[in-house]
Amino acid sequence: MIIYHPAYDAHHCSYRILNILSSVEEKKLEKDSLKLIDYYYLYPHLLKRVSKLPRTFNKYKNEINDVPEPFELTPNPKSLYFELVATHDSVLISLSQKSLITLSDNEIVLNIALLPKSLIETFNADEFSKSDFFIMLTTCFPKISLNGPNGFKSRSGLMEYRYG
């Protein structure tokens, strides 16, 4: 039996990354912020497990709590994240080589003028992109602190937070 999950699909990852970047206000994000948004895009139920969400998420508590648990067992969240990072890194290089994004040490900028109009139309028609949960991801994560003992990296337990 073949089991498909979009986390392991580089094409789906490209779609998600471009969709996220096109949805954030400035069309740019810190790399770690983008990776976290994508992680919770794929595994929204895991956001419920984060201890003490930052205040910017308070407005969306109901949306977070209403996310259903998946029917399959979710492996260790930290190992899921690290598996996903390898896909992120290869997709970011590929998108950069196609000039769809510009990469710097810690920032990713979307070159929106180079995106096909049909892709933008697809993003606009995407039901998940219209959801309050997706809007929360793309509005809250760019505003929160990731580093330090009270940053999101520490709270989520997914990444090293001391050397941000």
Image (tube, rainbow, N blue to C red):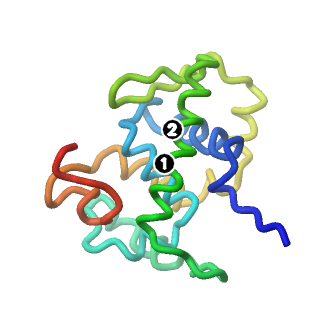
Point out the residue furthest to the right here: 1
Image quarter (top left, top right, bottom left or bottom right) of the N terminus: bottom right
Q: Residue 106, relative to residue 111: is it above or below?
A: below
Q: Type of residue at label 2?
A: Asp
Question: Residue at (39%, 73%) from the top-left corner?
Answer: 61
The answer to whether 150 is drawn above or below residue 26 in the figure is below
Identify the residue at horizontal 44%, vertical 23% (top origin): 103
- Number of residues whose C-alpha sits closer than 10 Å to that of mark 1, classed few (under 14), some (14–19) or many (20 or more): some
Rendering coords of residue 151 (x, y %): 21, 56
Quadrant where the image shows the C terminus: top left
Task: Looking at the picture, tell me which residue is in the foreground, 57 or 84.
Answer: 84
Residue 89 bears which disc, if any? 2
User: At x 58% / y 60%, what residue is drawn?
Assistant: 42
Is residue 160 depicted above or below 123 in this figure? below
Q: Nearer the viewer, residue 109 or 133?
A: 109
Q: Secondary structure at mark 1?
A: helix
**Callout 1 amino acid:** Val
x, y percentage for residue 123?
Answer: 68, 41
> Residue 117, position in %: x, y?
74, 25
The number of discs equals 2
Kindly indicate the quadrant of the structure image that contains residue 51.
bottom left
Is 65 positioned to the left or the right of 68 in the image?
left
In terms of secondary structure, where does tag 2 sit? helix
Q: Name the residue tied to disc 1.
A: 85
| Residue nearest the viewer, comparing 155 with 117 | 155
Whether residue 78 sits left or right of residue 23 in the image: it is left
Residue 138's spot in the image, x, y percent?
Answer: 46, 48
- The alpha-carbon separation of the residues under discs 1 and 2 comes to 6 Å
- Local crowd size for mark 2, using a 10 Å CA cut-off: few (<14), some (14–19), many (≥20): few
